[in-house]
Amino acid sequence: MSKTWDDLLKDVHELAPKVVDTQEVAALVESLGYSDRSVAEWGFANVFALAERMFLDLPQTSSLEERDVASTWLSIRTEIGSAARKLSSSLSYSIPWMALLVLEYLRPHALQVSPEFGSALSLSLIASLVTPGGFIQMIARAGNFYFGLREPFLAHRFCVLLLQLGMASSLLFAFLGVVLGAYFGVFHGVYLVLAAINYVVLSVLWMFCAILSAQGIAWCIPLVYLASASAAASVNIFGRIGTPLALMLWPLLAALCAGVCVQIRFRRSERERPEKQHSAPPRFSVALISLVPFYLYGTVYFGFLFADRVAAGTAIPWFSGLSFGIDAGYKRGMDLVLFAFLICAALIEYLSESYLRFWFRLAAELPQSEGRRLVSSLERRHSRIMFVIFAVFITTALFVLFVFNRWSGLAVSPQLLETVAIGGAGYLMLSMALFETIILACVNALHLALRAVLLGLVVNLLAGYEFSHLLGVQYAAVGLLAGAAVVLWKCNAATRQVLLHSDYYYSVA
């Protein structure tokens, strides 16, 4: 074993300056990658025996009352840290969309471009979120794992490998998209090329953002967006390059800035732990195979999220001269409820982690004979969280609808209200289903969530296409509603089945 006893004491003390009991010490030691077998080389029977010895050598609070206070403050800090980390990480992907939505309402003519160029950009944006979605999930999973083990060199190696694979796939999809778009005459040649470039740059940007989140500096992502947007706006004002080129320049500058931040963070992490340079790397082929379910889930999930827009884009009237274009009224209505969904998604990330910590704490405290009590406690908390998601989404959606229409001064048409109602119900059910899928993923039952989302995607595409072509473009949201209902139904049934065997799924998680 390469580490000495003093090194391990130092690592545990850095993670928790004041420990409360031996169980906390044991959890910290296991989080550093130690097992009963590895601590046997120090002469301990298991990790708990080592924790009892280490607890005496670590700084402790002097009384039971102080320990209770320390434990309370530790819980509060844990909750605040978890909330800040999850909210910043999830909202980082939503900020560009939210900013563009606000700008469209406040300055509707600021981003005015030709219909064909706008359609090409919309399609490239959707594609950039769908096709690299699997690599985003893989990078987040692998990066969090190795950074959690404090293995910066392995994290660097694995994240760069996944980034290279993602870039290669994006270039391949961009080439295929140009060839197919030219063959079917979707856009003129110049717009196809611009859409392909924008797609590749945005794909790289999202993957860089995933690495920044895994590195624990998701707070840098809004700064990257702000700096690059300011630079692109300045170039447009002083260089008079025009709105289309400015919209193309922004993601390129953001990707370059994010790449620099990623590299700086990797170098700093590696300088802090130079002894980890010679850590034995895993078999990358085996590790990649283990991440395949996350790749599939990420791709299918982002595909589901934008399937209704693809269906709506194909329903554009033939006399418009466009092969693909999203109706402005439909886009405005769906953007309003998508705004509420993105805010709720960040909250759901935190609620899911809080729920799992509650689950694991109960499983550790309750004896095996109290299995029924564990199940009932988990079901009660599950129901409360579902109610919180429902209340927050409804409140947020109504607030966003009121504020944005008050700002814009636009009259609320029946078509807009219809789109908001149908789309809002769909995103509400998707929000609830998102909580279920995160729980399933965290207890190694991702295959159940994957099957549910895949089935929902098929329903979303078919129903959205049929209703948008038969009844009108605003009814593409029916596909989202029907698909989300299927996902929620299947995921909720799977989650409740998991909760009935909480002790088993806790042991394999």
Image (cartoon, rainbow, N blue to C red):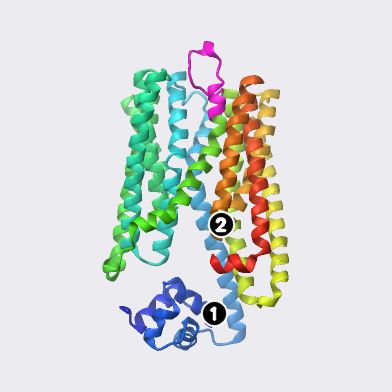
Query: Is 218 positioned to the left or the right of 63 in the image?
Result: left
Q: Nearer the viewer, residue 502 or 104?
A: 502
Q: Nearer the viewer, mark 2 or mark 1?
A: 2
Find residue 23 and name its label: 1
Gap between marks 2 and 1 measured at Cα:
27 Å
Magenta part of the protein: which range? 310-327
Type of amino acid under label 1: Gln
Q: Which badge, 2 or 1, is on the more N-terminal residue? A: 1
Q: Position of residue 358 (x, y in %)?
A: 62, 66
Q: Nearer the viewer, residue 239 or 199?
A: 199
Q: Nearer the viewer, residue 205 or 377?
A: 377
Q: Secondary structure at mark 1?
A: helix
Depicted 14 relative to depicted 251: above or below? below
- Left or right? Give the position of 391 relative to 285: right
Q: Position of residue 480 (x, y in %)?
A: 62, 35
Q: Is residue 88 above or below residue 119?
A: below
